[in-house]
Amino acid sequence: MNTTTDTTYKMINTRKELENFVATIEYEKAVGVDLEADSMYHFKEKVCLIQMAATNVNVVIDPLAIKDLSALKPIFKKSEICKIFHGADYDVRSLYRDFRIAIHNLFDTELACRFLGFPETGLEAVLQKKFAVTLDKKFQRKDWSRRPLPPAMIAYAAEDAGYLLPLAQSLKAELDEKNRLGWVHEECEYLSKVRPAAVNNQPLYLNFKGAGKLDSRSLAVLEALLHFRREVARRKDKPLFRIFGNPSLLELAGKKPLNLKQLERTGALSPKQISMYGREMLKVIQGAMKLATEKLPVYPRKKTPRVSLAVAGRIKALRHWRDKQAQKLAIDPALICTKALMSTIAVQRPLKVSELAAIKEMRIWQKKEFGRDIVKVMREE
């Protein structure tokens, strides 16, 4: 197998160039796809480059220059063309969020590596293992929204997509040999349907690690500070972490400084941050401290449903079976059966293979490959 890639690429900056490119690849069997975004540098992240590679074709598409990318939609929709990504979850969500591009016939090489039991599944490690290729990641954390982009950055972006086709070909052969290709195809089908989280009006602290340990007053302070940070980040067009880190806000929520001296003593902010935002933050904290007790937030506690001894025994038996199976297959046990799925199976206790059809959380490949084993474990418990 030829594992070398042509590093020559074409930059696409106009809709006409994009349409010409689409015409050249509409009969290809597979296309490698990679993205570069700017989440490290802006409040609202966006896709800044789309890299695509097919046989003898390697392009870098600039979506900041081409406002209408609808010409790409038929390629991503066409089931006859396999779209190859590495670690597709973020890319699938981003393409749909920014361009409403939905993907049919996706193959994720990172997921394939996990089902083959690779200890490291990052693209850099995988290419080193498979092809003895060393990727230079010096531009990985750069600002991809800047224009013009230096040629060296564009060349760097073009490189990864070119390796995806030979990598997918090699991984599919390995999976087929181990009779796991169908497993990955089904998982990729589910992966192709992930979507960005919907905007909601839930409190910000619900997605903040450590918030659950705070009392109601501290939670009110944290929520006020989170809204303040978001507003500053939006105004300055910077990501949240570049305004204040989460540990700083958690500490301020706990200590609740009410004047500049108290704020300085917390050590939560740098002198520069105090100079820029100190007085505003104190007003925010003071406002939260004045909230009436009945208006204070209460962190929602999910009560863990109590399971009977019989169900607990079945979960334990399933875990024992699963871990032995994972060891035999040399893959992560969670790929065979997650904790949540084991609990569902244990509660429903299917005693016939046909009864597995009622467990919607199970994949078809799981029922086909391990259904008889699972039913046997349930019968014995």
Image: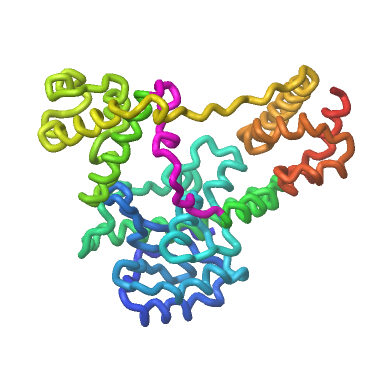
Residue 280 as seen in the image, left or right of residue 298: left
In the image, what residue occupies the spot 23% across and 62% down? 149
Q: Quadrant of the N terminus?
A: bottom right
Q: Position of residue 220 (x, y in %)?
A: 35, 29
Decide: is 207 above or below 109: above
| Residue 54 appears in the figure | yes
Closer to the camera, 331 or 371?
Answer: 371
Which of the colour schemes (rainbow, by chain, secondary structure, one colour) is used?
Answer: rainbow
Q: Main secondary structure of the magenta part?
A: loop
Q: Position of residue 210 (x, y in %)?
A: 41, 26
Decide: is 96 above or below 326: below
Q: Position of residue 255 (x, y in %)?
A: 27, 19
In the image, what residue occupies the spot 50% across and 41% down? 121
Residue 272 as seen in the image, left or right of residue 138: left
Closer to the camera, 199 or 334?
Answer: 199
In the image, what residue occupies the spot 33% across and 60% down? 48
Q: Which range of residues does the magenta coloring cover?
A: 194-216
In the image, what residue occupies the spot 14% across and 31% down? 274
Q: Position of residue 93 (x, y in %)?
A: 48, 55
The picture quadrant where one finds residue 306 is: top right
Look at the image and say whether residue 115 sits in the magenta stretch. no
Residue 337 as seen in the image, left or right of residue 85: right
Closer to the camera, 161 or 291?
Answer: 291
Q: Quadrant of the C terminus?
A: top right
Decide: is 242 above or below 220: below
| Residue 138 appears in the figure | no
Residue 189 as seen in the image, left or right of residue 12: right
Decide: is 355 above or below 145: above
Closer to the camera, 199 or 363?
Answer: 199
Look at the image and say whether residue 204 sits in the magenta stretch. yes
